[in-house]
């Protein structure tokens, strides 16, 4: 089992920045990929960015150039730096840990990000 705890959400004005953090605990040796997803009201959950344990990153097209995912292996943590935030970025952001074999996903409780003036 893997436990994920997110932090760092909040209210920010358009054009502002936020940094989300996700700390993993438990059977972390089994994790292959960690990432961030988001879900806005009335919409499906979507990928924001993900990073493999080897450091390869993937971003959703709308986040490229504005968001940056990173990890700290020593702290078993992954981060999402969000810049130039827009009202459309308003959503609950979820941390995800993925195991490849067998396929299994773990989710954090989510952290609210609201972009509004």
Image (spheres, grey):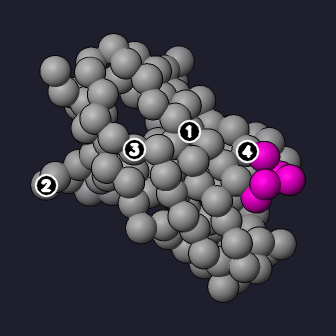
Q: Earlier in the sequence, mark 1 or mark 4?
A: 4
Instruction: In the rendered view, tell whether residue 66 sits above or below residue 28.
Output: above
Residue under label 1, please give it: 80
Q: Which of 101 and 19 is in front in this view?
A: 19
3 or 2: mark nearer the eye: 3
Q: Residues within 10 Å of mark 4 (few under 14, many from 20)?
A: many
Q: How crowded is mark 2: few (under 14 residues within 10 Å), some or many (20 or more)?
A: few
3 or 1: mark nearer the eye: 3
Q: Residue at x 38, y 54 (%)?
A: 111
| 75 falls in the magenta region | yes
Asked whether the viewer can see residue 94, the reply is yes
Q: Is the magenta stretch mostly helix, strand or loop?
A: helix
Q: Under tag 1, what secondary structure?
A: strand
1 or 2: mark nearer the eye: 1
Q: Which residue is drawn at 51% across and 57% down?
A: 6
Residue under label 2, please give it: 42
Q: Residue 31 in the image: x percent, y percent?
A: 74, 68
| 109 falls in the magenta region | no
Q: Residue 83 in the image: x percent, y percent?
A: 46, 21
Left/right of residue 70 with respect to residue 91 in the rendered view: right
Q: Nearer the viewer, residue 78 or 48?
A: 78
């Amino acid at each position: 089992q893997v436990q994920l705890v997110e932090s760092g959400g909040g209210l920010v004005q358009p054009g502002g920045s936020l940094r989300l953090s996700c700390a993993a605990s438990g059977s972390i040796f089994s994790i292959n990929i960690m990432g961030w997803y988001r879900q806005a009201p009335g919409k499906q959950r979507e990928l924001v960015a993900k990073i493999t344990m080897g450091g390869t990153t993937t971003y959703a097209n709308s986040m490229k150039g504005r968001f940056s995912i990173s990890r700290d292996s020593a702290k078993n943590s992954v981060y999402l730096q969000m810049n130039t935030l827009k009202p459309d970025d308003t959503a609950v952001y979820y941390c995800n840990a993925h195991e490849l074999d067998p396929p299994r996903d773990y989710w954090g409780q989510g952290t609210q990000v609201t972009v509004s003036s």
